[in-house]
Image (tube, rainbow, N blue to C red):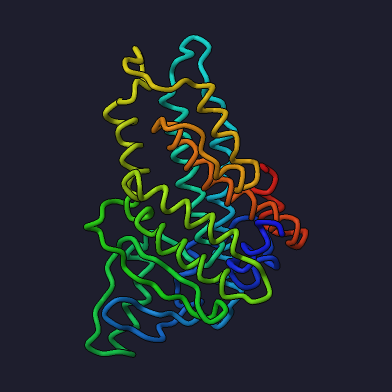
Amino acid sequence: MSITEPMRLLWVDGITNCKGARSWTSDKLFNLKNVTVSSVNADDVCLYLGNATQSTQYFAHEADRFASAAFETLHTNVKSESYARSTGWLLIKAYYAAFFAVHSLMRLHGWACTRLSSEHLKSINSEVPLLFPGNRKFTAGLYLIRSESGGRELRCSPLDSSKGGSHEILWSLLHPFFNNAIAVVLSDPNRDGQTFAVMLSDFLNRIDRVGGPKWFTATRNRLNYAHEYGAWFPYAKSTCDYDRLQTVLASWSTSPTEAAIVRGDDELIKFAAACSFLVSLCCATVRDLTYRSNPSSPFRKSCGLLV
């Protein structure tokens, strides 16, 4: 069984029927013409959509946008003939490709970690005191938006800013997202999701051994700001070379089962392999979506052309 088959269970309802060039954004979705408040509690607000296809279009267009960024990032060559030992930009490129890929994978499943502005929340906050007196107002910041009831509802949960900025908060969702994905694929009696579930579990265990999902941002920061690992001139204490790292990263366009294989104990090899694996998951499901979607699908018009 193809590794992509259980991944179809994660797709937001109706995503293969989405049409058009990328146009559905938070600006377009979050207004009174499209959403109305259906419930409020201490942790989130739930919005009702009269037209479920609008939320599906939103998640599809957003997933396409981030997938395109992930794939283009790894297609871009940063090797320098003059400074052949330089690996800084290659590793930073790997990080951002993985960051974009996770954003895309979440949106394909109907999750979005995104920033809502006061303007996005204006219509929500105008309705809350009228429909649910005494409840809180919602402030601008990062939210986890989840599609529910076949796209008829959006549950918007403020995310804890004490966990850091947009990067740290996204990575803090990696465990919940993958654990949810594992539960979904194992719950279908008609498909064998065991291989996929084990692959995700092994990946999470591997990441936990190096410090948990925050390791991605921590490594990026050490590379980008502290200039560690000998990745920058004069490459003191360098532990890895460009070609080895590039070979590992190249697995992003192969099967996730191949990209999941890590060869060697060097931290930068592990980092490149982890980034490559996340992009490979996105690549595999985008290829499948491109094949199964209608001719005017955003995946056929955009990110699918890059894989």
Q: Position of residue 67 (x, y in %)?
A: 57, 49
Find residue 268 and report its image quarter: top left
* 182 up-or-down from 65: above or below: below
Residue farthest to the top? Answer: 82
Residue at horizontal 65 percent and vertical 42 percent from the top = 254
Q: Nearer the viewer, residue 113 or 273?
A: 273
Where on the picture, by quarter, is residue 23? Answer: bottom right
Q: Number of labelled discs?
A: 0
- For image coordinates 40% across by 60% down, the residue present is 175
Q: Can you say whether 95 is above or below 226 in the image?
A: below
Query: Which residue is pictured at 33% across the width and 60% down the height?
Result: 142
Image check: 196 left or right of 102?
Answer: right
Q: Give the x, y percent position of residue 271.
A: 43, 37
Give residue 161's position: percent from left, percent from top.
25, 58
Between 43 and 276, the residue placed more toward the observer is 276
Quarter containing the C terminus: top right
Residue toward you, 2 or 51:
2
Name the quadrant of the N terminus.
bottom right
Of 253 and 136, nearer the camera is 253
Image position, residue 184 (x, y; %) = 54, 71
Say if 232 sits above or below 61 in the image.
Answer: above
Question: Is residue 144 rendered to the left or right of residue 130?
Answer: right
